[in-house]
Image (cartoon, rainbow, N blue to C red):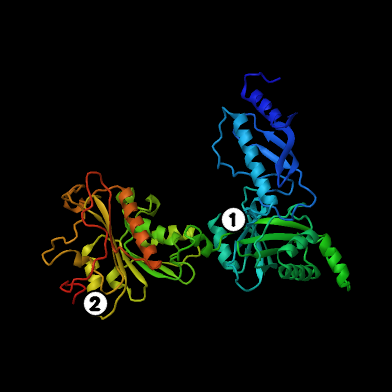
């Protein structure tokens, strides 16, 4: 018995008033009720399960009418009503009765709209909530031609096998190594792909389809041409004597997959087409959770509406406190992928005292920064084209790059690069990023056309600043011991902010919106930005770019 003054007693009373009868406790100790909800002008038998702690959304199921549509948004094959996503509602554990009634009202509204066909668009978005199975990693670009291989891999400490579908086994093997996976088996040509113009939608009734016959029936409701293509490819695989095959469907929404285990291998001798179809239709179909791991998707996933740095050739000069973090951000934005290249230019080695604000750690001490950074980045992105050039920028041919980034903090080097290109009658976009003083601010300047200012244009011929960084005087702070050990102190957080500013400017440039080309971010309290972010034009009297 439940005491009359408890939240659960209040729940029982309000549910009785709502027409729901208390059935008892479910196996998981949730409270079970049975009643009816009204939708599309009719009453529908419904069951309700309520978490006695009030921390989970009530589970609501309905008995659908026989003439219900084949596709219903937010209604599972078993009648489960998906009326709210987990975490989308703030639950009140002190008012279980009130929140249960609110959930019932919402479920009634969702069922009504779904039965009336007014939520069909949501079907496309919720497909994967019902398409469950083993994980299948897709290392293929949508629309890529060629046969598909299935590569199984796993970890020695886990009794599991993960399927990778690939059209480039060598590339995928690099990713297995990066993920600490060991190759178990390679099935050449064991997968195929089919393109469809229809977006997938979950079907009422038996879902996911347990057999090929039901799966083809579902596909036929979506796209009859795709259904025929899938059936043809499955028949070919079955006739070849394979025990199983895997199908990847390229839809406008995304990619999804399933594998088919054929009931029996095709026996020797000739069989009729009808016999082959009977065997195929009886075979089991297994949905797979398709997870794209191709470089293009991983790069575009976080910025789906903007171009990435893939295909760009970028030279990053300086792999120090700014360049190390910046290189990683550029890589995550697509640098070095597909036909692109990320060149790391730095002739210096990493001394142990510098790791306090460097991307690299003590394990890379006394190594060339460029080489150590390449190895660290390649471990996480093994298919990226990263080149380490442990030489001076002056000794490197930079003319072939689409963008040059100077992250050294050396003003003279920036002037040298500008005047060298100018005197040769050449031009290359240059982005310069630096820390102002002892971490007062970070700044970036992009010169992507000949009419834009270079770093020398920011001051007059007497080196007086024309675009001051902050309104207050910039202090001169040094730390260390003796002349040879002096350095400008600022924390790693400032280096990261400089790298973030540069990465932002690079992606804006790639996206065709490079301005403002001079940007400042104040990083220390007590200082205020002086010159606004703006596009600064070239000074014709500049000794670097005006010659």
Q: Which mark is residue 422?
A: 2
Q: Are marks 1 and 2 in contact (CB under 8 Å)?
A: no
Residue 129 falls left or right of residue 26:
left
Residue 532 falls left or right of residue 242:
left
Q: Quadrant of the C terminus?
A: bottom left
Q: Which quadrant of the view contains residue 186?
A: bottom right
Residue 363 falls left or right of residue 24:
left
Camera sees residue 247:
yes
**Residue at 29% over, 47% down:** 491
Camera sees residue 267:
no
**Percent of width and height locating residue 80:** 70, 44
Dot 1 or dot 2: first in sequence order is: 1
Q: Nearer the viewer, residue 34 or 441?
A: 34
Tell me how many marks there are: 2
Q: Residue furthest left?
A: 462
Q: Which mark is residue 96?
A: none
**Percent of width and height locating residue 452:** 26, 70
**Percent of width and height locating residue 65:** 78, 48
As drawn, 109 above or below 367: above
Q: Residues within 10 Å of mark 1 (few under 14, many from 20)?
A: some
Which residue carries the number 1 mark? Answer: 181
As drawn, 234 above or below 55: below
Residue 75 falls left or right of residue 299:
right
**Residue at 88% over, 74% down:** 270
**Structural distance between the alpha carbons of marks 1 and 2:** 50 Å
- Determine the secondary structure under disc 2: helix
Q: Nearer the viewer, residue 33 or 528?
A: 33
Q: Nearer the viewer, residue 138 or 59?
A: 59
Q: Quadrant of the N terminus?
A: top right
- Determine the secondary structure under disc 1: loop
**Percent of width and height locating residue 92:** 56, 31
């Amino acid at each position: 018995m439940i005491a009359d003054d408890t939240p659960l007693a209040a729940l029982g009373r309000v549910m009785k008033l709502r027409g729901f009868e208390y059935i008892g406790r479910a196996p998981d100790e949730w409270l079970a009720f049975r009643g009816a909800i009204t939708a599309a002008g009719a009453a529908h038998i419904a069951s309700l399960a309520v978490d006695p702690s009030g921390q989970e959304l009530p589970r609501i199921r309905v008995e659908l009418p026989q003439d219900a549509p084949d596709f219903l948004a937010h209604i599972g094959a078993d009648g489960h009503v998906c009326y709210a996503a987990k975490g989308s509602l703030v639950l009140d554990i002190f008012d279980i009765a009130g929140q249960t009634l609110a959930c019932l009202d919402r479920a009634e509204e969702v069922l009504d709209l779904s039965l009336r066909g007014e939520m069909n668009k949501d079907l496309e978005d919720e497909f994967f909530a019902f398409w469950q199975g083993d994980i299948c990693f897709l290392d293929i670009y949508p629309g890529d031609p060629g046969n598909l291989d299935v590569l199984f891999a796993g970890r020695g400490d886990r009794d599991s096998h993960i399927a990778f579908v690939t059209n480039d086994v060598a590339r995928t093997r690099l990713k297995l190594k990066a993920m600490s996976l060991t190759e178990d088996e390679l099935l050449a040509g064991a997968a195929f792909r089919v393109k469809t113009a229809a977006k997938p939608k979950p079907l009422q009734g038996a879902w996911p389809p347990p057999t090929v016959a039901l799966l083809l029936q579902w596909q036929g409701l979506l796209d009859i041409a795709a259904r025929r293509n899938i059936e043809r490819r499955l028949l070919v695989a079955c006739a070849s004597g394979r025990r199983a095959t895997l199908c990847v469907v390229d839809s406008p929404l995304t990619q999804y997959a399933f594998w088919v285990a054929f009931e029996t291998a095709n026996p020797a001798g000739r069989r009729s087409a009808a016999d082959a179809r009977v065997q195929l239709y009886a075979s089991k179909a297994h949905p797979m959770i398709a997870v794209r791991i191709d470089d293009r998707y991983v790069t575009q996933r976080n910025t789906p509406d903007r171009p990435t740095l893939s295909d760009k050739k970028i030279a990053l000069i300086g792999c120090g406190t700014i360049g190390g973090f910046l290189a990683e951000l550029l890589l995550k934005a697509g640098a070095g992928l597909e036909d692109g290249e990320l060149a790391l230019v730095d002739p210096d080695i990493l001394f142990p005292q510098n790791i306090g604000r460097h991307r690299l750690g003590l394990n890379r001490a006394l190594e060339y920064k460029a080489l150590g950074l390449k190895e660290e980045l390649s471990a996480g992105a093994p298919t990226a084209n990263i080149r380490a050039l442990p030489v001076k920028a002056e000794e490197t041919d930079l003319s072939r790059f689409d963008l040059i980034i100077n992250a050294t903090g050396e003003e003279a080097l920036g002037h040298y690069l500008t005047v060298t290109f100018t005197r040769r009658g050449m031009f290359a976009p240059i982005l310069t990023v630096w820390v102002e003083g002892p971490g007062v601010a970070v700044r970036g300047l992009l010169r992507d056309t000949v009419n834009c200012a270079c770093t020398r244009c920011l001051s007059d011929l007497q080196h007086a600043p024309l675009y001051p960084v902050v309104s207050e005087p910039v202090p001169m702070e040094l730390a260390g011991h003796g002349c040879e050990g002096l350095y400008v102190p600022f924390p790693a957080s400032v280096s990261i902010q400089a790298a973030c500013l540069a990465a932002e400017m690079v992606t804006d440039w790639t996206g065709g919106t490079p301005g403002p080309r001079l940007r400042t971010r104040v990083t220390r309290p007590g200082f205020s930005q002086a010159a606004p972010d703006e596009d600064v034009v070239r000074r014709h009297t500049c000794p670097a770019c005006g010659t």
